[in-house]
Amino acid sequence: MSNALLHYPNITALSQALASRKLSATEIAQDCLDQIKQQASLNAFVHVDADLTLAQAREADATLAAGRGNILTGLPIAHKDLFVTKGWRTTAASNMLRNYTSPFDATVVHQLLEAGCVSLGKLNCDEFAMGSGNKHSAFGPTHNPWDRSAVPGGSSGASAAAVAAKLVIAATGTDTGGSVRQPAALCGVSGIKPTYGAVSRYGMIAYGSSLDQAGPLANSALDLVDMLDVMSGFDQKDATSAEHCKGLPNAQGRIRAEFDSAAADFNGNPAQPLKGLRIGVPKEFFGEGLSTDVAQAVEAALVQFQKLGAQRVDISLPRTQLSIPAYYVIAPAEASSNLSRYDGVRYGHRSESYTDLADMTGRSRAEGFGPEVQRRILIGTYVLSHGYYDAYYLQAQRLRRMIADDFQAAFTQHCDVIMGPVTPTVAQPIQQDQNDPTADWLADIYTLGLNLAGLPGMSIPCGFGTGVSGKPLPIGLQIIGNYFDEGRLLAVAQQYQQVTDWHQRVAGQA
Amino acid sequence: MAWEIVIGLETHTQLSTQTKIFSGSSTRYGALPNTQANEVDLALPGSLPVMNKAAVELAIRFGLAVDAFIAPRSIFARKNYFYPDSPKNYQISQFEIPVVQGGTLSFFVGDQEKTVNLTRAHLEEDAGKSMHDDFVGPHGEASSGIDLNRAGTPLLEIVSEPEMRSAAEAVAYAKSLHSLVMWLGICDGNMQEGSFRIDANVSIRPVGQVEFGTRCEIKNVNSFKFLERAIQYEVRRQIELIEDGGRVVQETRLYDSERDETRSMRSKEDSHDYRYFPDPDLPPLVIESSWIESVRATMPELPAALRTRFISEFGLAPVDAAQLSSSRDLAGYFESVNAALPPDQAKLAANWIMGEVSATLNREEKDISQCPVSAASLAALLTRIIDGTVSNKIARDVFAAMWAGEHQGQPDSIIQAKGLTQISDTGAITAMIDAVLAENAAIVAEYRSGKQKAFNSLVGQIMKAAKGKANPQQVNDLLKAKLDS
Amino acid sequence: MALTDQEVALIARLARLHLTPDQLDQAQTDLNKILSVIEALQSVDTTGIEPLAHPLAAVSDVHLRLRDDVVTEITSTERRAALMANAPGAANGLFLVPKVIE
């Protein structure tokens, strides 16, 4: 068998194969390790340790043999190298942490391990999650499995690539400005960013603390339910972790229950499952800059949803364009402070030669951080500095409230979910001369608003466009919900995936 | 030129919690280096702060004690600066909206009462410690060692308005604040261990000028004696500087106790742009009025209230009342002694506690809680003064013997064993007077010629003859009667 | 609102990033480009709008959860070793840094 994940392309199927002993977790893990070696040129994995992986696989097999397994037991996953892990190094794709090993696991890592998942290692990403092409990595770029010359997206580019390339059945990513949704879209997989506070940030290396959320990437909305449900839950070690979600305790089981309930509702009306669902379509998401192929694919998806019975409503999110400067003030500001701890004193890179303490710190940081990270630290420092704090930082936070209010107005008055594109174009080439540090920013226009507002959003494949190289490249549809509406969002997405097969296409076999 | 001194104090008090402000690490003093610093305290990647409820409760207690406004909603902010004893290279503190706002502190300077307004008190985390011994770094460089056990200890930073006008006032304020935080049980006050650290902001201005002069901050003074000297030196320095035509530069200075001078700190941040912003990891601290009321209900009687009660109930002078209410233990001791005495003897009890008891405690560097003479025993001794068994002077000898534990510290046993009972018999005293007068005709003559001192000399001789045990009042009265007759 | 050489140098110093003169030049160019995009914020009228620091505060009362004052960490040299394992310079249980003269 060449690739278990090709034969069992979703969690349900693979889990059944394990439960019925067709395969063992150890066999699957070994198979994935082999695949990772074969596809090393993708450069998705930055740390692989077969011993650690196989030890977890053996544990999983023992659990299954004892009849104590659940749906995730023995499944091969991987973690973005922004989650700290005992055993495997954690580098945040940075020279600053090239040799760092954490003494503790991130909560998300721990919860997935407890559920019996087997980790295949750590995934490449943009350094400290700053970037949208997985190009800003100390370990080199990751490639898009659909077209090696194209980016997989970022910052969780390798998370999406690894799932798309069938190296793992699911992966963890982080989303601060779109970094789960955008790579999911560009790699043709499904990904979700939950409501801020639904998933613990403990052990997730901080970039923009008020924006960061962990989220899974997988092959379908159904798979995302399994992953997200286990990842979610109140964590007392994270003071921003939500204790309650719309009155219900934030605990494993909540999202699954809400998904099941919504799905049951929908499935109860087979002809028009989504009858009564109002889909808001923001006109600002379809303006200048949106490429034709993306516009067409998204439009086709919306038509499909209408066929499922949903009602389409035109809405306006007037400050969509302003989400860009707001985000690019707030995220770098928080990052500049979050990254101050990397000073070569207690861990991380320390320069080889220095004259005194300030010099040691200054050189260590200049040597350890890549240019994109340094740029964001500098601009973040500036917008917080004396005399500029009000005009930039506070102004951005005011805009943030207005953007959050815009979404609330839409949800209160017009629609239940919002849909639109994830990215303006398909994946761009990796080789791109870029003198302009803001060149990639405009492409974040559809995703940033959710992070500013803290809302949940997901991306599911909805078609293909043509890349610069001529190859077909995936296009994603973004589905946005109100606070803590993850369960329903996933059920809506699943209805679409029941009548389409974009999410089942395999890279290299389009 | 007549100069006015302007002083404001910022006091960092370590709160007596079991754990740190943002982590569950112990705050116990004296552990091996870095054994009380977990991933949060070391700022390892992925770590996050979680707020300690007890630290907030102690801040509320302080706010109530100084009659301050307790903010129903206060914000934690990051104070960004790089220093190796601050692992995140930002300190979580409070900036625009602190938990405690305003308040006042009243205290005595000599026998003058002064009230100073507080600006605010806010919660923040302490930094670690640098050991400047001779360590060798990974490239052979001279190095300091950093111990982060202290990093994350909860601090309440208490800021006064710049209303003190002399080193003495500043010291009196500091001592009063020190007593108060120990009184409230929010800080152990151990200055050697760094539990209570004072920064003094000192400036001068010509008398009558309204604008403040440029101030210098003297950091981390950890004794009242050094505080006084540091301020005095700094004031002199600033006056001399200005009178020589120079200008005071705003800067941070350290007090060097060996040289008795303040020095500019070269290593501190050259630019003080802390880039404060609300910490995204910590939502706003909300304090409901029900919590404040429940803290209020468990507050001990405050020193100020106690002081007032001592004045009104026991008729003590304000200065005495203030001294006796400087610690809960001392106040408790006083009240116990007083309760065991006949009515209207509070002044006697006060004098003895502030005098003999305190002096002996100070000499032996003991605290009232370690006093070997119990309140009951002291009351028993004082009763013997009241009923004339011993004079005040002899009682001091009895007290010394009680302190040393002679005769199980029982005053009556000591008095009897040493034969210290006062002689109050008129006949006996008259006899002694006659004897002394007979032998001191010259002094008698001096007295009769108007020299008052001669009287005292005669009294002295009589007391000597009586081995100090004659009732002084009776000696005085009888002698006067004899001489004037 | 372009940044001058000195301003860029100050920002780099505040951020403890030791940049070469060439890097400072490039940073100046980059930052000024970034500022030109961020400037769009200035034109927005935000009178009467409170800054939003915690996203969920837009719709609910988000406040700080408090932890009980109970020791949860063990005090031991073994634990210390695990936590200090990544230290570039350490001795006698202390982190070493170039000496700072005060």
Image (cartoon, rainbow, N blue to C red):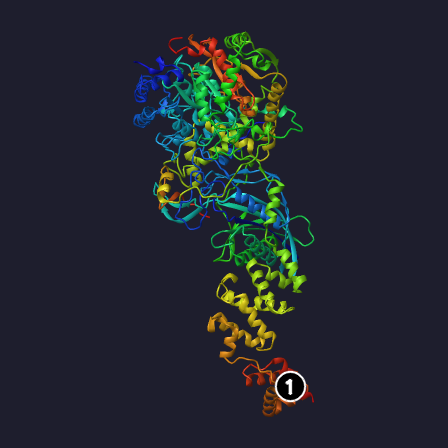
Q: Quadrant of the N terminus of chain A?
A: top left
Query: In the visual, does A269 lie left or right of A503?
Result: right
Which residue is tagged 1?
B479
Residue nearer the viewer, A409 or A248: A248
> Is residue A356 visible to us here?
yes
Residue B456, above or below B287: below
Residue A187, above or below C30: above
Q: Look at label 1 and name its amino acid.
A: Leu
Element marked by disc 1: helix
Q: Give the image quarter of residue A157.
A: top left
The x, y position of residue B424, in whole percent, is 60, 82
Q: Quadrant of the C terminus of chain A?
A: top left
The x, y position of residue A236, in whole percent, is 48, 35
User: Looking at the image, which residue is at 42% across and 31% down?
Assistant: A106
The x, y position of residue A222, in whole percent, is 45, 17
Q: Tell me the subunit letter for badge 1.
A: B
Residue nearer the viewer, B12 or C95: B12
Q: Give the image quarter of residue A41.
A: top left
> Is residue A437 visible to us here?
no
User: Looking at the image, which residue is at 62% across and 16% down?
Assistant: A414
- What is the total number of numbered labels drawn onto the structure image? 1
Query: In the visual, does C60 lie left or right of A343?
Result: right
Residue nearer the viewer, B465 or B160: B465
Residue A208, above or below B127: above
The x, y position of residue A368, in whole percent, is 41, 31
Q: Classify mark 1: residues with Cα within 10 Å, few (<14), some (14-19) or many (20+).
A: many
